[in-house]
Amino acid sequence: VKGLNSISVSNDADTEDGSSAESLFGEPYVTKRNGSISLEGRPVVDRVTGAHDPGQEELDYYLSVGGCDGDARIRIIDNCGHAEIWDVIVVSKETSADDTSETVTWELERVGEPEEVPYVQVTGIATSPATSATVTIGTPTTVTVSFTPTGASNQKYSVASADTSKVQVKNIDGLTFDLVGVAQTTSTVNVVVKSMNNAKTATIAVTVNEAD
């Protein structure tokens, strides 16, 4: 789901008191485990096609159905890639707006027991273009990042240029970013991509040419 700026996950329980009527101290025990999620963000709409973000459309769809057809599946992932899969129902949606922005909030409740997803370690990282790239001043060259294995849990990374006066990194978006030449090079400038998990690295030697 794109456009989210806040995700709140709550776990609580229903309890009953198992102590005797004569006991001074309570002996609560859990009868039900419950979970809920609150998603807050902004509506995302393609300005060219008018299409809504598919993830937001899915939430709106499940808001409109009930019964057995009303259960959706979502994956909740923390900053390090640890994930759980929840079956949920979408119970409400609230939209608010002011002069500068529009905010939408969905409330979800968990159905049944969450499913823990096994954590898969990163063993390698690569880029395309791979070890070298030639760029032209002012023209972005898009780089795609890939992880080994492809199902690695934490696919976050950092990317840095050794000389930002010659080569800059811009427009980081998921597994892609742009290399932008700033000044012509007499020797290559290394751009290093480093995985958050296990600190695997890939290096691109970048040459910058003048524009024609």
Image: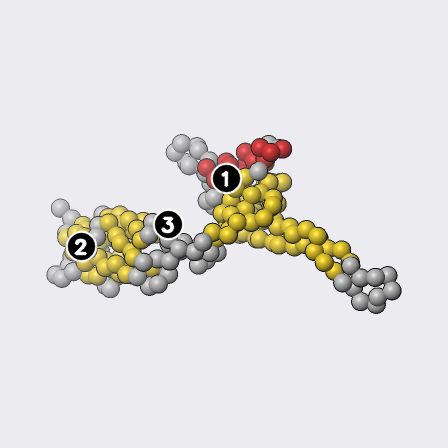
* Closer mark to the observer between disc 1 and disc 3: 3
Identify the residue at the far right of this view: 22
Is residue 162 among what the camera can see? yes
Q: Which residue is mark 2?
A: 132
191 relative position to 107: left or right: left
For the residue pair 70 and 139, the one nearer the viewer reads as: 70
At mark 3, the secondary structure is: loop
74 in relation to 182, above or below: above
Q: Residues within 10 Å of mark 3 (few under 14, many from 20)?
A: few
At mark 1, the secondary structure is: helix
Give the residue displayed 44% in from the left and 33% down from the top.
51
Give the residue displayed 26% in from the left and 50% down from the top.
143
For the residue pair 132 and 89, the one nearer the viewer reads as: 89
Is residue 64 among what the camera can see? no
The span from disc 1 to disc 2 (Cα, nearest Å) is 38 Å
Tell me where residue 72 sits by quadrant: top right
Choose the circle earlier in sequence order: 1 or 3: 1
Q: Which residue is mark 3?
A: 151
Instruction: Tell me the amino acid under the disc marked 2.
Output: Ser
138 in relation to 57, above or below: below
For the residue pair 122 and 192, the one nearer the viewer reads as: 122
Image spot of residue 70 (x, y percent):
59, 35
The span from disc 1 to disc 3 (Cα, nearest Å) is 24 Å
Give the residue displayed 14% in from the left and 53% down from the top.
209
At mark 2, the secondary structure is: strand
Choose the circle earlier in sequence order: 2 or 3: 2
